[in-house]
Image (tube, rainbow, N blue to C red):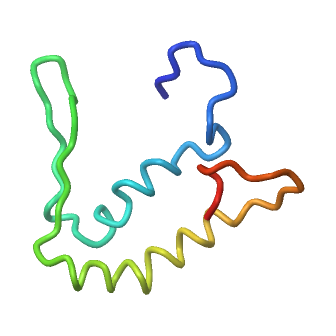
């Protein structure tokens, strides 16, 4: 994980959270349109997509989102939640 010597990294206890949020649904339901980009130095990025967003969103609503809700349960906190923590 890239941290550039930062202390108290957000989501350190859940290292997959950002990837799950950004590309997890596409990797689960539209794998044919997910590509890893490489250059002469190695992996440099990725491209993901779906052919038809309506069926994709329906699949996510019924399977991916419930799976993510189970994997990342709502935080139970006595303190005020930050904007990033509000569901």
**Which image quarter: residue 71?**
bottom right
Residue in view at x 44 percent, y 74 percent = 64
Residue 77 image offset from top left, x and y in percent: 84, 56
Q: Looking at this rendering, what residue extends furthest in the top direction?
A: 5
Residue 3 image offset from top left, x and y in percent: 52, 22
Left or right: 69 as drawn, with respect to 75: left
Give the position of the C terminus as an image quadrant. Answer: bottom right
Left or right: 18 as drawn, with respect to 52: right
Residue in view at x 38 percent, y 60 percent = 24
Up the image or down, 9 lies above or below 27; here it is: above
Up the image or down, 58 lies above or below 78; here it is: below
Q: Looking at this rendering, what residue extends furthest in the right direction?
A: 78
Left or right: 75 as drawn, with respect to 68: right
**Which image quarter: residue 8?**
top right
Name the residue nearer the viewer: 31 or 79: 79
Count of numbered circles in the view: 0
Residue 76 image offset from top left, x and y in percent: 82, 61
Residue in view at x 14 percent, y 61 percent = 33
Residue in view at x 44 percent, y 81 percent = 63
Up the image or down, 44 lies above or below 30; here it is: above
Left or right: 73 as drawn, with respect to 63: right
Name the residue nearer the viewer: 86 or 11: 86
Residue 44 image offset from top left, x and y in percent: 21, 29
């Amino acid at each position: 994980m890239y941290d550039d010597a930062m202390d108290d990294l957000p989501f350190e206890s859940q290292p997959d959270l950002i990837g799950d949020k950004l590309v997890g649904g596409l990797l689960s339901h539209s794998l044919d349109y997910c590509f890893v980009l490489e250059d002469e130095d190695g992996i440099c990025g990725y491209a993901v997509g779906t052919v038809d967003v309506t069926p994709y969103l329906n699949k996510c609503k019924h399977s991916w989102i419930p799976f993510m809700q189970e994997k990342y349960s709502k935080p139970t906190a006595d303190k005020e939640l930050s904007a990033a923590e509000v569901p």
